[in-house]
Amino acid sequence: MQPFTVHTGVGVPLRLSNVDTDQILPSKYLKRVTRSGYEDALFAAWRQSPDFVLNDAAFAGASVLVTGPDFGTGSSREVAVWALQDYGFRAVIAPRFGDIFRTNAGKSGLVAVELAEPLVLRLWELLDASPGSSLTVDLERNVVEAGNDFTEPFTLDEYTRWRLLNGLDDIAITLESEGDIAVFEQQRSPLKPRVGSRR
Amino acid sequence: MTGPRTIIQKIWQNQAIERPGKPDLLYIDLHFVHEVSSPQAFDGLRDTGRPVRRPELTMATEDHNVPTDTLLLNDPVSRLQVETLRRNCEEFGIELKRLGEAGQGIVHIIGPETGLTQPGMTIVCGDSHTSTHGALGALAFGIGTSEVEHVLATQTLPQTKPKTMAVTVTGRLPEGVASKDLALALIAQVGTGGGQGHIVEYRGEAIRALSIEARMSLCNMSIEWGARAGLVAPDETTFDYLRGRPYAPTGEDWEAAVDGWRQLASDEGAVFDREVTIDASTLSPFVTWGTNPGQGVPLDDSVPDPAEIGDPEEREAAARALAYMGLEPNTRMRDIAVDTVFIGSCTNSRIEDLRIAADVLRGRSIADGLRLLVVPGSMRVKQQAEDEHLDDVFLAAGAQWRGAGCSMCLGMNPDVVGPRERTASTSNRNFEGRQGPGARTHLVSPAVAAATAVTGRLTSPADLPERSRTESRWS
């Protein structure tokens, strides 16, 4: 995983709430077995409309998505995160995320920043007032910056933040506890089922 | 931790491996795998040379993109995904239920029906509806592909301690009101983000009165209001359901297991981070009008008028949803005509759901020009339904009777809803394009789905004219 420290890039306002993962990545693209190449699939249905914000040339090259509450609800599809990354997004800012989406983002290196709704509204106004302007997501200082008078703190759970800052493989970290896992397994109830052992 | 504990805290403590300075590792008792969310996880194992730590705690099935009217995988992209799963299961030693086999079916149907899903277990799957297994008192939740790889490699997941919530459902559900109606009413009340960050225990008199299958429909929908998982403490209903199933313990082991399961219930006085109470006796059949599961009303009501919604964000979302759904404000829900009815999905494709639908359809015919798909959740459910001759009822009414799979729930297999086509569906999501690009979905219970198929408009069984004596008797 690529480390994430400080990122500055064009912000794009997606003024919608409840953007579920079926919208971020329609299910027909879920049939692929690959890990990359999903940039064409991102918001595929909505991108057919010329009015969709990602089709606005003013926001070309955007890498920070600023959107409404309950972004990434619904299906657990991690491909929704990969598609955002393949398109070029490094961070998503929203008042609230679907739990599985936020976890998936943290595993894949996309930073999911929670900012309160009034702050997101201010960012939308800033971005609409000067389309193509940049935002900074600073994971070292835990702040979002925009223009001269927007500096707002955010929190990310410490473990995810530490992994993102250092680009660490979660599985390798867990396997450092292999001894403890083995001890747990020895004490585990023998009554619990094992696949293939049925009567 | 001392003092009274919730069932959630008890299961957590039983399963957590503590790490200084890092989140607990939650040991996973059972991991379900399917063709869609797993290929890149197995690739990850190969890339790093890691084995599957506990193949015997892992079970795979083919459900999401398989057809339900043939055993042939004609779509080359779907076929590659299914064949990839077959190769991966072979290579890593994982038991797989293939399309057409007796044990195949939707992942959340086959776990409980075989007795693999048991109280107190931790269960995960790369599918957000894994919370279904919570009906048996398991802590079960959906995960993404990176976490699928993590569980395959370590049989654990790093997890921060969840917040807990109690949803207490008082009273009894009136006759003809299903746990699906309860779920839709709850989501309309608390909103799609209402449970975010929480694990929920459903409790109270109404929950105790529900069958295990009805509890599954309720727990299944937990994710639709943002909850990480939902569960019901095991009770005699749970033990009666599990007894004698293929993976249930037997003899002395059964007694020992039940003794342990009885200890799981939340202690008297245990404190939840949040509590929500609903009076079941006030509920009636519930249907959605919009494009998220929280946009629902009682069937007796009408499509809301966005102009009358105070919150600007909700107003805008409602207007957008009505435009997508092709609905006018203030239309009576009962006046909405549908083209297709789908009875199936991990929410409502179990034998009880099919019995309820068959009871409504027995001696009746579906409306002219309407398409009704009845899709059992598993090959076992299909066999059971056929043993009870429910398939004869469905076919006589004019329905299509299919093989097992996710089918029309999610638009990634041949069973899709067309653009601007309207459907009443027993599935769990009415998102834009969920059942196919441009599809318009109304979420309903199996009883409402079956009655709707008869009239061609959103209908409850109570609205239907009486059948003659000979028509209504069991065949």
Image (cartoon, helix red, strand yellow):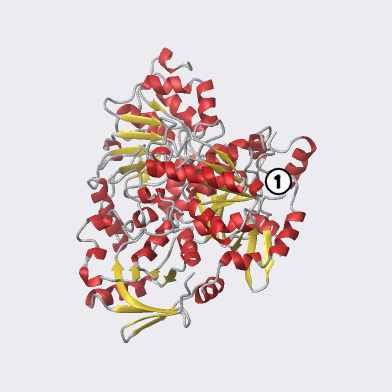
The correct choice, above or below, for B104 with respect to A77 in the image is above
Q: Is residue B340 visible?
A: yes
Q: Quadrant of the N terminus of chain B?
A: bottom right
Q: Which residue is mark 1?
A: A192
Residue A20 drawn at (x, y percent): 38, 56
Relative depth, front residue between B345 and B258: B345
In the depicted view, which residue is nearer to us: B367 or A158?
Answer: A158
Residue A187 placement: quadrant: bottom right
- Residue B207: percent from left, percent from top: 56, 43
Question: In which image quadrant can residue B440 be found?
Answer: top left
Query: Quick one: B120 or B208, which is closer to the camera?
Result: B120
Which residue is nearer to you in this view: B285 or B326?
A: B326
Q: Is residue B127 left or right of residue B317?
A: right
Measuring from the top left, give residue B173's x and y in whole percent: 50, 39
Report the number of numbered marks.
Answer: 1
Which residue appears at 39% of the width and 65% of the height? A85
Relative side of B146 to B241, left or right: left
Q: In the visual, does B48 lie left or right of B281?
A: right
Q: Position of residue B93 (x, y in %)?
A: 62, 45
Please say if B286 is above or below A64.
above
Residue extending farthest top: B470
Disc 1 packing (10 Å; few <14; some 14–19; many ≥20): some
Does B145 sit above or below residue B95? below
What chain letter is assigned to the residue under label 1?
A: A
* Residue B210 seen in render: no
Image position of A161 (left or right of A69): right
Residue at image coords 43%, 46%: B184
The amino acid marked with disc number 1 is: Lys
Q: Residue furthest right?
A: B252
Callout 1: helix, strand or loop?
Answer: loop
